[in-house]
Amino acid sequence: RYGRQIIAITDPSSGTLRKRVDMEQAKDPKSFRSLTVMKGVGGRFSELNIGLLHLAIVGVDIREVLDGAKAMAKQCSSPRVKNNPAYMYAALQTIMYRKKGKPIAIVMPFSERLKSTADWYVQLLAESLGKKYARKIVRRGGKEIWENDKSRIVNAGRTPIPARGTNDLHSIQQNNIEGEFDKTVTFIKVERFSDDIKVTGTGDVLEGKGYSRLLSIAEEATEWALVREGRPSCTIVLPEISPYYWGALLFFFEMATAFEGELAGLNTYDQPGVEGYKNYMYYKLGKPGISQAVSEEIRRNPLKKAARYIIK
């Protein structure tokens, strides 16, 4: 009965894992219990639903996470752009991208604990807004249906890059300052750290200063250097890294991405571009159940490499 120790996170109705869940539960209802991804919404938006399981397992107070998200949701419901941080962020990034030629989005938290959050935002932005087709809205049976408009190829989407301060100040920051004028930088600054270490025994300007103070000065200096060169940036300030403020930060980024998708006329929640490589792998591995149409497409369009470009 090992299946009673398993909680599967999967699609509500389709996929290999869903089939396994249904099969195991038919034999034992307490086996392979499952949490389902919200139908029609990509897994990258799941931090505040099925992602809560992982947080609870490692001891995070998920009520605090949801309280932070709830407070941010209220703020992001304001119809006034200046009072709505997510809408403001989306509007400014849209202007930078579409009007000012800034397709690259760098997100740089000045905290090691937020590095993975920056990595998550990269997936959130790239998978949500990197789209080939514009969105078309149709109505069927009184319901609003979103479809890809095959007549409108847009190949849209900013390219996100994760970085972290101060680790990347001697690498990516050089390019930010003097490289192509094609970027915006979003800093995440933490005002108070739960643990702080003071520098001792140096006998110089660092003596007695806490690492949190040094990080704060480094973040401010990085902002200043960008401003001096006329490079666009913005800063998100967290009072501290806590479940409450982290929940608010996640919801902020999710809403900002949703707003940006609306401004661009895209379907923020699908990811058709990632299905191609998956289908190719399934075909090559001989996975059963691949549709005839997918198999035919791969057979008709094999991967070709021109011999003259291969170095041996």
Image (spheres, rainbow, N blue to C red):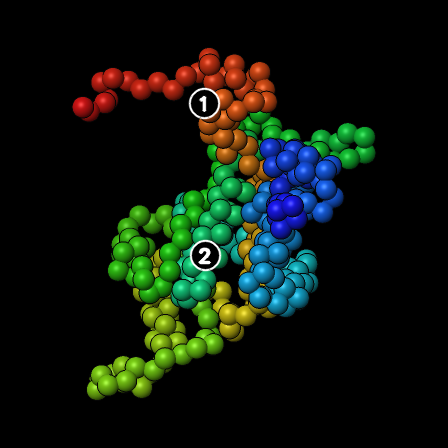
* Position in image of residue 89 (x %, y %): 53, 56
Q: Label 2 neighbourhood size at 10 Å, few (<14), some (14-19), many (20+)?
A: few
Percent coordinates x, y for residue 289 in the rendering? 59, 22
Which is more toward the observer, 148 or 115? 115
**Height in image: 308 above or below 272?**
above
Classify the position of the N terminus by image quarter: top right
Residue at the disc numbered 1: 284
**Is mark 1 in CB contact (under 8 Å) with mark 2?**
no
Q: What residue lies at 43% left-to-right and 59% top-to-bottom?
A: 115
Residue sitting at x 64%, y 31% = 147
Residue 127 x, y percent position in the rendering: 51, 41
Screen quadrant of the C terminus? top left
Question: Along the horizontal axis of the image, is 282 left or right of 179?
Answer: right
Q: Quadrant of residue 81?
A: bottom right
Tell which of 256 and 59 is nearer to you: 59
| Residue at the spot 32% in from the left edge and 62% down from the top edge | 167
Query: Does residue 275 appear in this view?
Result: yes
The x, y position of residue 59, in whole percent, is 57, 66
Query: Residue type at mark 1?
Result: Lys
Q: What residue is disc 2 on?
A: 116
Other residues around mark 1 within 10 Å, as few (<14) / some (14–19) / many (≥20):
few
Mark 1 or mark 2, whichever is nearer to me: 1
Residue extending farthest to the left is: 312
Give the structural element (helix, strand or loop) at label 2: helix
Q: Secondary structure at mark 1?
A: helix
State whether residue 141 is above or below residue 101.
above
Of the residues shown, which amino acid type is indicated by label 2?
Ser
Q: Earlier in the sequence, mark 1 or mark 2?
A: 2
Instruction: Give the residue at the far front of this rendering.
Output: 1
Q: CA distance from mark 1 to mark 2?
A: 32 Å
- Residue shown at 46% from the left, 13% from the top: 300
In terms of depth relative to the viewer, which is nearer, 46 or 127? 46
